[in-house]
Structures are given as C-alpha cells and as structure tokens.
Amino acid sequence: MAIQEDQRLNRGVPWHFERIPVCRGVHLNAAVAGDGPLLLMLHGFPECWYSWRHQLRALSSSYRCVAPDLRGYGESDAPRGVSNYTVEMLAGDVKNLIHALGRERALMAGHDWGGVIALVASLMHPEVVERLIILNSPHPARMRQQLRTNFRQLARSWYVFFFQLPWIPELTLRAGNFSLLMRAIRVGLVQKEAVSGADLDHFRRALSPPYALTAALNYYRALMRRDFLCDPPPDHWLNRKVQAPTLVIWGEQDIALTKELTHGMQDRFAGGFEIRYVPDSGHWVQQEKPDLVNTLMRNFLSVSNPLC
C-alpha cells in the first residue's frame, strides 16, 4: 500500500509519514510524530511501524518519535539477496537513520527483531545510542548460548530453522493472506483484545509487496549463514558490553522466547541495567499492555532517572 493510502487510513492521529534515506538505494518509510529528543522505535517480525501506535500517541508530546518500517517491510526499500539483511547492515541503517534525521544520537526502543537490531547498533555504534529500551528481545550472545544448552528454547525456535529453507516458507506463510502468521500473533496474545482484525491488516499490508516476505525471512537466513552459533573472535563486536543505560521490558508469557534468556543478561551491560517483568503479557508486550509500557518508557527516559 502506498504511503498516501496509509496517510488516509490514519487521519486524526499524531503521526505523518516520511521517506528517509539510510544508504545508497535504500529509503525507510517511517511514521513520525512530535518534537524533542529523538526516540527511534524498531519493530519486530511479522509487524511494521504500526506495532508502536500506542507509544507514538503517548510519547510524541515529549519526544520526536520515529517508527520506521525496517528494511524490506512495507513501503521501505527491499534490496534483493540474503547478504543485504545481515545484522551489521541493519544496525548501519539505524545509525544512518539517526544522522539523516539531523541528530548525532538517539534514544532507542526495539521489540523482537527491532530489539536485536537496537542491541547490535549499541554494540557496533555506541556513540549514536543515548538510552536503550529492549522489549521481549534477547541479547544475541545470550540467545546463542541458550540455543546450545536450553532444549526448551531450541524447541521454541523451530521456525528459525524452517525459515532457512528456500521458497517453502514463503509459500506457506503467504497462503490465505498470511493467515498462519496472523494466527501466530493471535495465539501469542495473553490480552486477546489488544490486537484487532483491523490491526492485523496493517501487518498484512507490510508483508504484501512482492519481495517483502522474503526480505523479512532473510533476517533469519542472514543470521544463520553468518555462523551465528559459532564463537566469534575475541575482538568481535558481540563480545563488547552495551554502554548505554538499558531498560528491558519482558512479557513473561512469551511463547517464542523463554524467560531464561533474561537470566544473567545484566552482565552484558556496562552503562546501567534494569529489567521489568510483565506477568500478564505475552510476546507483544507494547501492544498488550500499552499503558504500563508507556509509563515504564516515560519514567526511564526521564532525565531524572537514576540510571543517567
């Protein structure tokens, strides 16, 4: 769906859409609202900018909120080939997006894949991340360790291995207007009323462009093809500690990611670390418990927060 159509569907809301260049040949479509310190909001799979709708409404009175469709999704450009979706390249998009918006640094929130990208950006480009909020997303080093030692997490991650197959995942997931993916979102909700059929239509549209679904799956393919399960050399960015003060918000009833992924997580952070568990939420925590998440985000981002 064109950006203009998204504008029509979202009349009366605080956001508008901008198409922002992040590298040669790649522009990201982003919902933009408010003014003040820059707050980037990075979505997960199989979602889009719209997963941050509640935060765009609540936080745009104090921040310049920017929620992009990540590379490959929706109206954002989708270069062909698995090699265009490495975590290093996705983290580079974040750094370049901040600079394209005329800022040197940003506050950053990421959910699911957006959380992974935010973490990698914090490790590779610490100078651009002022504060970090991670929602139901594992630290990549912790995820590697758990896939080796935790059978429960390995079993829950079956889809990652399925996505490595050529074409079959695309055919399966596109069938019935993405019915399997939309059902997965529904099944993972503890607060069933949090995501309506109209909300799911936004996620369907983000995957509907010809290459979008393949691009989204290429995130997983690139991750595994880069020897994700092998130990990196000592000087690799994965062995660094996150310098930005960090808040982790974790819906405890996540059906894809076990709570064990958060255990010992604080050892990977040097700039201050806080974790808040949400017992009555699943994976989609910022959509299931928006009021709570908005309050936690606002309090953490405040300049008076003791982690500063």
Image: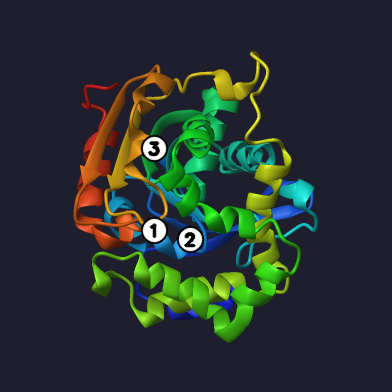
Looking at the image, which residue is at 63% across and 51% down?
220
Q: Earlier in the sequence, mark 2 or mark 3?
A: 2
- Depth check, front residue: 17 or 44: 44
C-alpha distance separating marks 1 and 2: 6 Å
Q: Which residue is mark 1?
A: 52
Mark 3 and mark 1 in contact (Cβ < 8 Å)?
no
| Disc assigned to residue 256 | none
Q: Is residue 85 left or right of residue 277?
A: right
Q: Extreme top residue here?
A: 234
How many C-alpha atoms fall within 10 Å of the one at disc 1: few (<14), some, or many (≥20)? many
| Disc assigned to residue 261 | 3
- Asked if residue 197 can be seen in this view, the reply is yes
Q: Is residue 160 left or right of residue 34?
A: right
Compared to residue 100, the image places residue 122 above or below, namely: above
Looking at the image, which residue is at 28% across and 43% down?
297
Mark 1, secondary structure of its residue: helix
Looking at the image, which residue is at 76% across and 63% down?
166
Mark 3 and mark 2 in contact (Cβ < 8 Å)?
no
State the image coordinates of residue 190 (x, y, percent, origin top left). 25, 64
Q: Which residue is mark 2?
A: 49
- Depth check, front residue: 190 or 11: 190
Mark 3, secondary structure of its residue: helix
State the image coordinates of residue 218 (x, y, percent, origin top left). 69, 55
Residue 303, quarter of picture? top left
Mark 2 and mark 1 in contact (Cβ < 8 Å)?
yes
Q: Amino acid at mark 3?
A: Leu
C-alpha distance separating marks 2 and 3: 25 Å
- Asked if residue 40 can be seen in this view, the reply is no
How many C-alpha atoms fall within 10 Å of the one at disc 2: few (<14), some, or many (≥20)? many
